[in-house]
Structures are given as C-alpha cells and as structure tokens.
C-alpha cells in the first residue's frame, strides 16, 4: 500500500500522462459515437417506416385530432418536406435547444413533463445501486472467504435463485405477498395523496412507499456484485500477499477486509457503474408494477396512449443519464485505484 | 491441458440444476401440442374459470386456456432466446475473428465501433425500436441480435488474438494455410467452450428482454408470450385469477432464466482455472 501512496505523490512521468490522456479521449469519443448512434436510430426508424413519417413520429391516434394547418406547421417544423440530411440537421439543432417535442397527451412540452418524474426514478435507482452494491460486496466477501462451506453454498444458491426473477416479476411477487396478502405496505404511488405530512412523517411515508420497489430491485440486482466479489475474492485469496499476511499472524478479520476485501473493491466499483444501465431499465419495469410516479410509469403511459414524442423523449433522457454516469465513472476510474493511474 | 467441460458442468450441483430446468422447459416447448388438448388462441370456455380438470390453470379474460398459453409461451421464449443467441454469435464471430485476423486499420475501426456499441443500453434502444416496429418473433430476433453482438465480438477477438499465436496455428500457417482455413479448422473449434458460454449469456438476456418488451406491450399483438400474459393478468389483480394466471407465467419465466443462469455459472467456473475445484485454496 505504501508503494502506491508514494507513486501517487510523485510526479508521474510525462509519457504515462500522455497515454492516460489519450485513453480518456478515446473513452470520451466512444460516448459521443454511442450518443450519435442512438440519436440516428431515433431519427431514422420513424422516417424509414412505410407511410407518412409524421404519422410515425406522432402516432396515428394523434393525427385524428390534427387540423390541416397544424399538420402543415408540424411538417415544416420537422422539415419533413426537405431532404433527409437537412431533416437530420434540424432534428439535432432542436435537440440542442432542449426541444424534445410536444406531448399531446399532457399537452405540455416533453421536457417539462419528464422533469417532474425524473427525481423519483433517480431516487429509486440511486438507493438501489447503493444498497445492492454494499450488500453484494459484504455478502461476496464473507461467502468467498468461506468458499465451499455451508454459508457460502446457501448464499450462492439463494442469491442466484433471486437473480432468475425478472425485476418486474420480483416486484409483483413482493407486491402480492406484502401488499395484497399481508397488507403491510401501500399498493401504489410514492406518497399518500392529500395526507399533508411534513418533516419526519413525510420521510416515513416516503420510505413506506419506497420499501417494496427498492426491495425488489436490490434482491434482483444483488447477484452481479455478489458473484463478482465472490469470484475476485477467491482469486485474491490465492495471491502471495495473503500468505504473507497469514504468516505475519494477521487476524482473519483483518485479512478478510483489509487485505483481500480492499483489493476486491476495484472491479466491484467498476461493475457497479456498468450495472447502472441495467439498474435503470430494471427501475423502469419495477415502477410500472408499483405505479411509482417515475419515468417508468410515464413511459408505460406514453406507450399505452401512443404518445410517441413523450416516449422518445423519456428514452433519450434515460440514455443520456446512463451515458453521463458511465462517462464520469470512466474519467474518475483511475482515481479509484492508484495502480491504474500508474500502469496505464 | 484439456478439461472435460461437459463433465465439469453436469456433475456440479448448479450445473445439474440449470441443465435440468432447461431440459424441462425445452420439453414443454417441443411437446406443447401433446401436453394440451386446446389451441392457444381458441376460446375454450367462460372467462375467468378457476382451475379444473378441463382447464388445469383455468381460463383468462377471454376464455382461453391458460395452461395451453403457458406451454406455447415457452416456445416463443426459447425461440427468441435461441435465435438471438445464434444470430448474435454469428455476428460476434464475424466481427471478432475478422478484426483479430486482418488487424490494422480495419481492426481499430471495428473495435472502436464495438466500444461505442457496448455502451448503448440495449433494453432502451430495444423499447424504442419495438415501439415503432411492433416486431413479430423473427423481427424481434433480428433487433435483439443487432443490440447484443458487440459484447461477444470483443471476447472472441481477444481469444482469437491469443489463439492465432499458438503452436498448431503457427505450424499450419507455415504449411501455407489460408486465413479461412485457419479460422474454420483451428480457431473456431478452440473457441468452442467460450462460444457456448457466450450463447448461454445471450440467450438469457434475450429471454429477459423479450419478456420485458412484451410486458410493456411493445410487440406483435398476436405473439403468445409470458411477458404479455403477466401484463394482462396484472390488470386483474383484484380478482383471484392472479394465483393461476399471473404467478405461473412469472415462475415459468423465472425458471427459464434460472436455468440459463445456473448452467452459465457452472460453465464459467469450469472455464476459469482459478475458480475450478482442484485449484481450491483459502478454505483449506
């Protein structure tokens, strides 16, 4: 460990700096390319559909209420009468202005609708990520250390059984058991409507509504972190420095967490970031089951009402959130472990 | 060193459990017409009938036999899973092997593309595409494969790069073997276990995604799918029907996914020499 600290304090050689800068640039480029690919899919699919592109963009139901003048205006707005290249350009510029279109179901700009629902999703997904990573890490370390013994077998079997449940089905099972059968928790929503709670009561009410969706997500998402920690733990325990620690007479607990656990942390943190995309999509499905007022429920509603601009807007916002989180993680990755900064 | 992967998978507990589940599901899917007397789309009785001798799991809101739909749902699930696994595997091999064997600018461009595609969250793009296309089984397989191949391509490329420097390949090259000969006779056979692990992983993800998309209702309305059964059943939770409509569909889906998870876990343990039993340390 001391060596690593020293390496961090010393000024790194220029060559290494250059390589890491290059890597970061490459990583950044990947995200830009990915974003453009998604935007392009989003732009091309409705326009390549057979029939009127306006109908594909706005859905057939919407056009029933549209007057010829409005249709004229919309055609002009999407530049649908001009060549594809110009259409693409106008699509991108309107996106840069933050114009995601107009939700005809809510009769408000899409961005405004989304911004009301986004915080709930972020709350649910963020807490789920935190809890499932911490719990998965803890269980993984304990399980990997006791490889082959009863506790390890029970944990391994149990956690893997849970992972087989799709997020939404786990949500349904929890909902039916705790909500319908035991009537312990409310069946839907994020807050008791018109209760007018404040302060501690509000927080309690919030947690009461949050418990089941959060529980479902954590139970299903635990597996990734758990299996990775367990596997890394097993490989780390075979390393020479563990033998040294044992030879020194370090207590088991110290070896488990300070020596092996700490070295297991890096891939786990990286994987937590990569899992974020899965977690967010899982959150969408779980929200639908619990009618939690986040983007998932909004997405479901937009699909049912065929409010296409809203649907596309939600998916774009989610994609941008996921990409941003992963990019940030890539950039700060080297800071997590001095070895990475030194070796790359 | 040659490891008998098959033996290692089917003699361990998780492997046996996983394979058992998969065989069960595959049997149900293949023998569906023999296991039920009804057609999945036929209206066979009054709506919301409780389980009885005629209808093992009762009937749904339009009087279709739920047990029959459950069996035919296994077909859709496994067909989409298997189809996506095969197609995306072919794409992965094509991209990964060609990048590794040709090298140079092509390799760099291909890997840049793969790196960018890997970041794209597949479920979100799948929802987007499916909402417009309302895909049937075939189209769904194509869409999902196009989203899932990059992960495999990266693994195949890395493995091919290491394989192509090995002795037998080197020897074959000195005898004048062409790239295609190397690929089909030396590299792909040696990739075997890794390709199977990849396929299991892709199948699992595809089954998941198919169920998710149909749960959202963004697929061909005529498809018989567990996800769609759950979406419909969820609307009637206030009745007792969830016991034989919602739960069986969910458990069938979960057991299928579990089958793939456990088999994949057993194979991964066999493939990773450090995780194999003989290499056990730490605990003894």
Image (tube, rainbow, N blue to C red):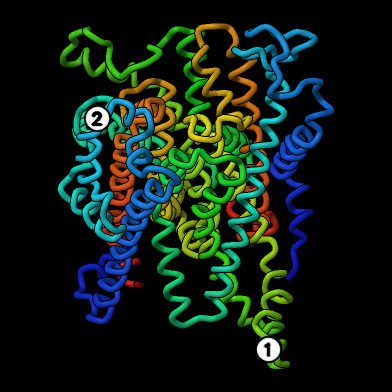
- The residue carrying mark 2 is A67
Q: Nearer the viewer, residue A273 or B65?
A: B65
- Rate crowding at label 1 as few (under 14), some (14 to 19) or many (20 or more) other CA atoms within 10 Å: some
Q: Nearer the viewer, residue A83 or A165?
A: A83
Whether residue A298 is situated above or below residue A19 in the rendered picture: above
Say which mark, if any, is on residue A266. none
Dot 1 and dot 2 residues touching (CB under 8 Å) = no
Q: Chain of mark 2?
A: A
Q: Nearer the viewer, residue A57 or A123?
A: A57
Q: Residue at x 58, y 35 (%)?
A: A164
- Secondary structure found at label 1: helix
Return the x and y of residue A306 as percentages of the image width and height: 38, 30
Residue B93 is left or right of residue A109, and the answer is: right
Whether residue B258 is situated above or below residue A323 in the rendered picture: above
Residue B63 is left or right of residue A337, and the answer is: right
Q: CA distance from mark 1 to mark 2?
A: 70 Å
Q: In the rendered image, which quarter is residue B80 located in?
A: top right
Whether residue A310 is situated above or below residue B157 in the rendered picture: above
Q: Nearer the viewer, residue A197 or B236?
A: B236
Q: Name the residue furthest right.
A: B34
Q: Are the residues under marks 1 and 2 on the same chain?
A: no
- The residue carrying mark 1 is B173
Q: Residue at x 68, y 19 (%)?
A: B66
- Secondary structure found at label 2: loop
Figure label count: 2
Q: Residue at x 44, y 7 (%)?
A: A183
Q: In the rendered image, which quarter is residue A305 located in?
A: top left
């Amino acid at each position: 460990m001391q060596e690593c600290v020293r390496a961090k304090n010393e000024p790194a050689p220029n060559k290494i700096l250059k390589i890491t800068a290059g890597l970061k640039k490459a990583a950044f480029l990947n995200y830009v390319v990915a974003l453009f690919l998604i935007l392009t899919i989003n732009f091309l699919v409705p326009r390549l559909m057979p029939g009127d592109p306006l109908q594909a963009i706005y859905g057939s139901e919407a056009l029933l209420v549209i007057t010829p003048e409005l249709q004229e205006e919309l055609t002009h707005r999407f530049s649908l009468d001009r060549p594809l290249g110009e259409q693409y350009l106008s699509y991108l510029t309107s996106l840069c202005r933050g114009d995601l279109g107009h939700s005809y179901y809510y009769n408000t700009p899409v961005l405004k609708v989304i911004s009301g629902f986004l915080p709930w999703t972020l709350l649910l997904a963020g807490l789920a990520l935190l809890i499932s990573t911490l719990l998965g890490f803890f269980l993984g370390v304990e399980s990997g250390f006791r490889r082959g013994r009863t506790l390890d077998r029970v944990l391994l079997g149990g956690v893997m059984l849970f992972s087989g449940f799709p997020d939404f089905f786990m949500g349904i099972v929890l909902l039916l058991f705790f909500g319908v059968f035991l009537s312990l928790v409310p069946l839907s929503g994020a807050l008791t409507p018109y209760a007018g709670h404040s302060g501690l009561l509000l927080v309690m009410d919030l947690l009461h509504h949050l418990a089941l969706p959060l529980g479902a997500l954590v139970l299903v998402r635990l597996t990734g972190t758990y299996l990775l920690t367990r596997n890394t733990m097993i490989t780390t325990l075979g390393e020479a420095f563990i033998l040294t620690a044992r030879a020194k007479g370090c207590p088991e607990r110290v070896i488990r967490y300070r020596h092996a656990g700490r070295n297991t942390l890096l891939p786990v943190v990286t994987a937590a970031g990569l899992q974020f995309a899965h977690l967010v999509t899982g959150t969408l499905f779980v929200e639908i089951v619990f009618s939690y007022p986040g983007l998932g429920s909004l997405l479901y509603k937009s699909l049912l009402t065929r409010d296409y601009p809203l649907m596309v807007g939600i998916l774009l916002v989610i994609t941008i959130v996921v990409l941003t989180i992963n990019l940030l993680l890539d950039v700060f990755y080297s800071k997590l472990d001095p070895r990475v900064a030194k070796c790359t | 060193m040659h490891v008998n992967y098959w033996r290692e998978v089917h003699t361990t507990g998780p492997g046996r459990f996983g394979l058992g589940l998969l065989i069960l599901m595959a049997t149900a899917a293949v023998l569906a017409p023999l296991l039920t007397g009804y057609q999945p789309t036929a209206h066979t009785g009054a709506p919301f009938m409780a389980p009885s001798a005629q209808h093992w799991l009762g009937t749904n809101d339009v009087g279709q036999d739920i047990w029959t739909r459950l069996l035919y749902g296994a077909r859709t699930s496994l067909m989409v899973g298997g189809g996506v696994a095969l197609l995306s595997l072919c794409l992965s091999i094509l991209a990964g092997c060609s990048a590794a064997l040709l090298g140079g600018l092509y390799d760099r461009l291909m890997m840049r593309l793969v790196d960018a595609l890997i970041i794209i969250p597949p479920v979100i793009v799948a929802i987007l595409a499916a909402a417009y296309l309302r895909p049937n089984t075939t189209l769904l397989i194509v869409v999902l494969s196009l989203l899932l191949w990059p992960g495999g391509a990266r693994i195949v490329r890395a493995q091919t790069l290491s394989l192509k420097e090995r002795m037998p390949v080197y020897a074959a090259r000195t005898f004048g073997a062409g790239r295609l000969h190397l690929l089909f006779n030396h590299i792909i056979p040696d990739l075997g276990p890794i390709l199977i692990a990849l396929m299991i992983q892709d199948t699992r993800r595809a089954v998941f995604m198919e169920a998710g998309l149909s749960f959202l209702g963004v697929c061909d309305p005529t498809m018989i799918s567990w996800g769609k059964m759950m979406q419909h059943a969820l609307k009637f939770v206030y009745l007792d029907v969830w016991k034989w409509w919602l739960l069986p569909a969910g458990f069938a889906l979960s057991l299928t996914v579990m089958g793939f998870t456990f088999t994949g876990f057993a194979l991964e343990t066999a493939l990773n020499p450090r995780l194999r039993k003989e290499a056990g340390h730490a605990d003894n």
